[in-house]
Image (tube, rainbow, N blue to C red):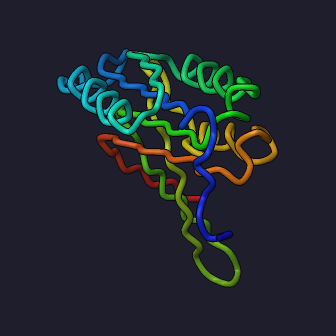
């Protein structure tokens, strides 16, 4: 049936769990340690191998996920991939005034311990183009952030 994923692989897959709780310029997330344990336990109970990371900078989050995406032999033998990130986050509302009216778009950011990084940049690391051995396989992303809203007028 082409409407179901093939889970018949040597490994179910890998789950990356990142939980940021201490920040240079933001209040701490006191439940960050609990977050990482709950998320890791949930993935392990499903049969996924879990890699845990705590208090990563924006650059470290990007580098960790790029390194995981480069595990092409492992992904080729896996049925799925999962990633869960707990941190502070931002929703940036961009209002663009044009001749045909005002247009609003949104960008979502996840905070490293130092700076925010666009969510789409992290998720795109595992796109079909960037991670070919996951093509046709489910890639699950769980983002748990304390949201900050910003509005930008252009």
Q: In this rendering, is residue 46 above or below 49?
A: below
Left or right: 27, with 12 as reference point: left
Quadrant (top left/top right/bottom left/bottom right) for the N terminus: bottom right
In which quadrant will I find the C terminus? Answer: bottom right
**Which of the 4 image quadrants contains residue 47?**
top left
State the residue at coordinates (54%, 69%): 104
Q: Is residue 65 above or below residue 92?
A: above
In this rendering, the answer to whether 124 lies above or below 136 is above
Q: Position of residue 72 (x, y in %)?
A: 75, 28
Of the pair 16 and 136, the residue shown nearer to us: 136
Image height of 83 relative to 37, above or below: below
Residue 139 image position (x, y, % from top left): 58, 47
The residue shown at (34%, 41%) is 145
x, y (%) of residue 143? 41, 43
Residue drawn at x 45%, y 54% as measured from the top left: 151
Residue closer to the observer: 154 or 88:
88
**Residue pictured at 50% horizontal, 17% vertical:** 57
Task: Judge from the rendering whether residue 84 lies leftward or rightward of residue 64; answer left or right.
Answer: left
Badge count? 0
Position of 152 with respect to 9 (left or right) is left
Q: Most extreme residue toward the bottom, as rendered?
A: 100
The percent coordinates of residue 147 (x first, y second) are 33, 45
Q: Nearer the viewer, residue 113 or 46?
A: 46
């Amino acid at each position: 049936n082409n409407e179901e994923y093939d889970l018949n692989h040597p490994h179910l897959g890998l789950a990356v769990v990142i939980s940021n709780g201490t920040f240079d310029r933001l209040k701490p997330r006191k439940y960050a340690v609990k977050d990482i344990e709950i998320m890791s336990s949930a993935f392990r109970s499903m049969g996924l191998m879990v890699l845990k990371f705590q208090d990563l900078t924006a650059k470290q989050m990007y580098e960790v996920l790029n390194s995981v995406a480069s595990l092409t032999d492992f992904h080729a033998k896996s049925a799925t991939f999962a990633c869960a990130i707990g941190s502070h986050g931002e929703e940036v509302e961009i209002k663009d005034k044009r001749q045909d009216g005002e247009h609003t778009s949104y960008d979502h950011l996840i905070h490293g311990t130092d700076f925010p990084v666009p969510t789409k940049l992290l998720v795109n690391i595992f796109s079909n183009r960037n991670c070919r051995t996951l093509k046709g396989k489910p890639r699950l992303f769980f983002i748990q952030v304390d949201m900050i809203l910003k509005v930008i007028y252009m």
